Image (tube, rainbow, N blue to C red):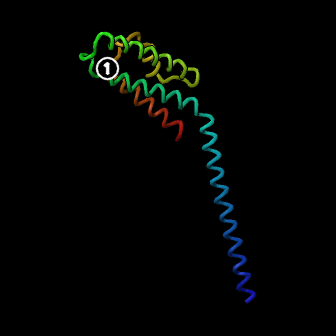
Amino acid sequence: MEVFFVGLSAISTLAAAAAAWFSYQISKDNFKFQKKVTNNQATSYQLNNVLELLIKLKFELKDLTSLSDDEFLMLDLQLKELKRQINVLAHLVQLTPELTKLWSTRDVAHLVEHELELVIKVTKSEIKALWD
């Protein structure tokens, strides 16, 4: 009977050790994630702002013929806001060549839809890379 209780004691000790190990691993992973959030939060927020503006601008550019003159002029304001957000992003990270090219675009008339699609794709991959 004594051997039975010694065996149960050994099993419970092993279970406690395993639980402590899993708790340590979870704690370590949680710490890594919190560290990533702290380091990447501002960059991720700014990249998301740029991405949102890019998608809005791309959507507006799809149907230029139906835009009134005032709506077309609003596109220039949207481009200026996008460039302002890219400028803020440039203070956080090194800009990709695609964003740099977009930032140097003078006006909406010089935007090309496939270039916008490429910049959107690159920006999405940059956001994904922050969290991988």
Q: Residue at x 48, y 37 (%)?
A: 128
Is 79 on the left-hand or right-hand side of 23? left
Mark 1: few, some, or many residues within 10 Å (few <14, many ≥20)? some
Eyeballing the image, is 121 above or below 57?
below
Which element type, helix, strand or loop, lies under badge 1? helix
Q: Residue 118 appears at what percent x and percent y?
A: 38, 27
Viewer-proximal residue among 123 and 65: 65
Eyeballing the image, is 24 above or below 116?
below
**What's under tag 1, amino acid-wise?**
Leu
The image quarter in which residue 93 lies: top right
Is 19 on the left-hand or right-hand side of 104? right
Is 19 on the left-hand or right-hand side of 6? left
The image quarter in which residue 42 lies: top right
Considering every residue shown, the one lying at the far right of the view is 2
> In the rendered view of the protein, which quadrant contains the N terminus?
bottom right
Eyeballing the image, is 41 above or below 12?
above
Viewer-proximal residue among 52 and 109: 52
Q: Residue 69 appears at what percent x and percent y?
A: 30, 10
Residue 23 shows in this picture: yes
Instruction: Give the residue at mark 1.
Output: 61
Q: Residue at x 66, y 64 (%)?
A: 19
Q: Residue at x 41, y 17 (%)?
A: 78
Is 54 on the left-hand or right-hand side of 21? left
Residue 109 shows in this picture: no
Viewer-proximal residue among 98 and 77: 77
